[in-house]
Structures are given as structure tokens and as C-alpha cells.
Image (tube, rainbow, N blue to C red):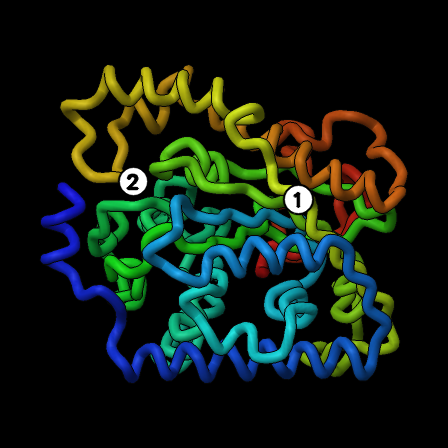
């Protein structure tokens, strides 16, 4: 699908009502988050101006050269939207220059009202294997995130394989609009809340690997580290569980932009060789043949990309003088396999509090 044909077949941007809803929901949510953070808590932000400069250069959609992928540790159910409360007032009222994120389908999209709210808030419905057979790194939502980060082409998401998928799983979201090329996508690659007393992290999952390997061109990548929201919404909190605690010190550190070609260039080159071998079976950006999904080399590449992304977030963590992770091996999926198959639990790997419902 060429850029020209794609642009002609799709609206340049969402309808006026859709844009107004997104502006209102995102702007008010971010404003309330900022009021809560700065009126009831202590806030320390590092690298904010650097991040704002990056955002300012991206205001004109037509001048963007690539997407922006931000990655962050995940310590609380309230990380998003609270972490964006450190941005200036009014920032989120321009949704075309604000983040897209991934939210649990079984929570954020379980009925029409919630689906309308979160989709207007630029959240993509994500299935999780722990709760849905449609989960995993190859679900349509991850492919849509790849398209958001890319130049072209834009297509409507395909439904998950098999019967039983609800209409809300494949909504007519703005990623299908040509004006959303080179968007900003934010992810929490740990894919679950992980509250460790020393701020250790879990392994990073493959969705972020796909976004770096498959987006065209490769997106800019910026790591973020947060500490404090786990005290606002601790996993062992009592009633009322739905209200955040205050009087907390929040730290948000925006790292340096990753030298993507230096860090990921070799892995992208190997990936592109694999794609060439499977080119006749790969027609649409974000759709993969079985070999590109499950082949040994493809799996190795995703594991290594995820490890390197995690290392970039660790660099930000180290800059804040947190102790090194110990013992080693937390970056490996196999380290965590002995954990119980529960929604919420205290990990028998690192004594952290884990919430896989968020």
C-alpha cells in the first residue's frame, strides 16, 4: 500500500466531535493530575525541559520524521495519567501531540461507556494472555501501535483470531487516520504493576520489541523512570482502595534520547533480512508470517531488543543513585516463571507486590 493511495483512502484526521472529546478528556485528566500532584505531594522532575523540547519539535505533524516511543517502569495503577501531571497546564489539550497508550481491554473497555472514555483518551485496548486467548505480542493492538509510530500505511485493525471477539476489540480508532503518522506511543513494558522496595524491575515483554523492530522508520526512543506512585496507590492499601494517597514524594526522570541506530541498528538489520526472506507472505505493516512470529531467529531478536530497552531505563534509574539490582537475572523471563498464577500476589522471586490486573 503506497503512501499516496493510503492518504486518499483515509480521512486526514478524526471528526471534529472526536477531536473535541479527546481534547476535553485528555486535557482535564492531565490538569486534575497536575493539581493533585503539586498541591498534595512533593514532586521532583529531572530532564523535563529536554523532553518538552522534543515535544515542541513534534507539534507540526507534517514535519515529523519519525515516531516517538517512550518506555517506563510500572509501579502503580495510577502511573498513567498521574505521571503526565508533571507536564505544563494545557499540554494535553492538544491530543495530536500527546501520547497513545495501551490499556487492559478487560478493565478499560469492558463496556461501551468506558470504551468511549478511554478511546477518546488515546488508549488502545490490549488483551492479556493471563485473561484472554487473544493476548500476546501479535494481537492487533500492538500492530496498530506500530502503525501509529510509522509513516504508512494505515489500515483498520483486524479482529483477534477465533470467534467470540467483541466489537469493542476492533474499534474505529484514530490510528486509521493518515494524520496520525509518526505519533507518540507510551508503553510500560513490564506489562503489570511491580512494587519493589528497592525499585527493581521485572523483565520487559516483546510488544516493545515489535515496535522498535517493525516501525518504519525506527522511532525515537526515550526512557523514563518513576518512583512514588506506588505510595499513592500501594497494592496492599486498605479501604478506600479507589482513592490515591497523598503526602508522597514523586520522582519522574526523563532520560536522554536513545542513540537508536547505535543501540538497535544491528538488530533491525537482522530483522529486515528475515523480513526479506518472508516478503511474499508479509503484505501489510504490522502483520507477520508464522516464521516472523515464532521462528528461532525472530524470537532471539525480540528477547535482545527487550533486554536493551530495559537497560536504557536502568540507565535513568542509576542516574538517580538507586542500588544495582541483585541478584542478576531479573531481565530474563525464565527468572519469573515460578511465580504463582494469581491476579495479585507477593512475588516469591523478589518479594515485590505484583498486580496483573493493571
Q: In screen coordinates, is 153 left or right of 293? A: left
Q: Residue at x 10, y 49 (%)?
A: 5
Pointer 2 or 1: first along the chain: 2
Q: In screen coordinates, is 106 left or right of 43? A: left
Q: Residue at x 86, y 34 (%)?
A: 324
The spot of residue 256 in percent (x, y) is 67, 42
Secondary structure of the residue carrying tag 2 is loop
Nearer the observer, 243 or 213: 213
Q: In screen coordinates, is 253 left or right of 281? A: right
Query: Does any portion of residue 181 appear in the rendered image?
Result: yes
Query: Where on the picture, by quarter, is residue 339?
Result: top right
Q: Residue at x 32, y 56 (%)?
A: 62
The spot of residue 21 in percent (x, y) is 38, 82
Query: Where on the picture, by quarter, is residue 66?
Result: top left
The spot of residue 30 in percent (x, y) is 59, 76
* Cα distance between the residues tagged 2 and 1: 33 Å
Q: Which residue is the site of mark 2? A: 286
Would you call the spot at circle 1 few (<14 residues within 10 Å), some (14-19), or many (20 or more)? few
Q: Residue at x 75, y 45 (%)?
A: 347
Q: Which residue is the site of mark 1? A: 340
The spot of residue 172 in percent (x, y) is 25, 66
How many marks can you see? Answer: 2
Do the CB atoms of the residues marked 2 and 1 lie less than 8 Å apart?
no
Query: Where on the picture, by quarter, is residue 164?
Result: bottom left
Nearer the observer, 184 or 229: 184
Nearer the observer, 100 or 254: 254
Amino acid at each position: 500500500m503506497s503512501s499516496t493511495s493510503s492518504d486518499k483512502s483515509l480521512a486526514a484526521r478524526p471528526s471534529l466531535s472526536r477531536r473535541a472529546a479527546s481534547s476535553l478528556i485528555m486535557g482535564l485528566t492531565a490538569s486534575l493530575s497536575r493539581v493533585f500532584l503539586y498541591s498534595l505531594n512533593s514532586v521532583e522532575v529531572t530532564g523535563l525541559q529536554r523532553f518538552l523540547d522534543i515535544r515542541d519539535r513534534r507539534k507540526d505533524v507534517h514535519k515529523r520524521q519519525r515516531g516517538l516511543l517512550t518506555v517506563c517502569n510500572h509501579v502503580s495503577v495510577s502511573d498513567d495519567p498521574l505521571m503526565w501531571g508533571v507536564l505544563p497546564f494545557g499540554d494535553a489539550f492538544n491530543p495530536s501531540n500527546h501520547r497513545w497508550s495501551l490499556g487492559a481491554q478487560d478493565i478499560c473497555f469492558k463496556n461501551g461507556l468506558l470504551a468511549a472514555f478511554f478511546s477518546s483518551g488515546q488508549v488502545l485496548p490490549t488483551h492479556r494472555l493471563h485473561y484472554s486467548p487473544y493476548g500476546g505480542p501479535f494481537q492487533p493492538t500492538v500492530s496498530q501501535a506500530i502503525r501509529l509510530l510509522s509513516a504508512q500505511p494505515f489500515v483498520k485493525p483486524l479482529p483477534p483470531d477465533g470467534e467470540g471477539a467483541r466489537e469493542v476489540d476492533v474499534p474505529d480508532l484514530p490510528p486509521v487516520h493518515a494524520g496520525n503518522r509518526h505519533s507518540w506511543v507510551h508503553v510500560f513494558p513490564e506489562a503489570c504493576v511491580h512494587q519493589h522496595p528497592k525499585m527493581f524491575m521485572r523483565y520487559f515483554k516483546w510488544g516493545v520489541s515489535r515496535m522498535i523492530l517493525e516501525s518504519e522508520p525506527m522511532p525515537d526512543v526515550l526512557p523514563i523512570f518513576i518512583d512514588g506512585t506506588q505510595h499513592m496507590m500501594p497494592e496492599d492499601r486498605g479501604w478506600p482502595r479507589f482513592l490515591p494517597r497523598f503526602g508522597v514524594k514523586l520522582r519522574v526522570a526523563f532520560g536522554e534520547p536513545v542513540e537508536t541506530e547505535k543501540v538497535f541498528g544491528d538488530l533491525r538489520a537482522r530483522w529486515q533480512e528475515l523480513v526479506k526472506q518472508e516478503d511474499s507472505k508479509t503484505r501489510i505493516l504490522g502483520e507477520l508470517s508464522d516464521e516472523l512470529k515464532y521462528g528461532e531467529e525472530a524470537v532471539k531478536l525480540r528477547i535482545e531488543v527487550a533486554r536493551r530497552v530495559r537497560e536504557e531505563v536502568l540507565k535513568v534509574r542509576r542516574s538517580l543513585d538507586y542500588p544495582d539490582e541483585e541478584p542478576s537475572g531479573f531481565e530474563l523471563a525464565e527468572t519469573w516463571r515460578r511465580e504463582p498464577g494469581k491476579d495479585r500476589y507477593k512475588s516469591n522471586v523478589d518479594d515485590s507486590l505484583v498486580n496483573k490486573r493493571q
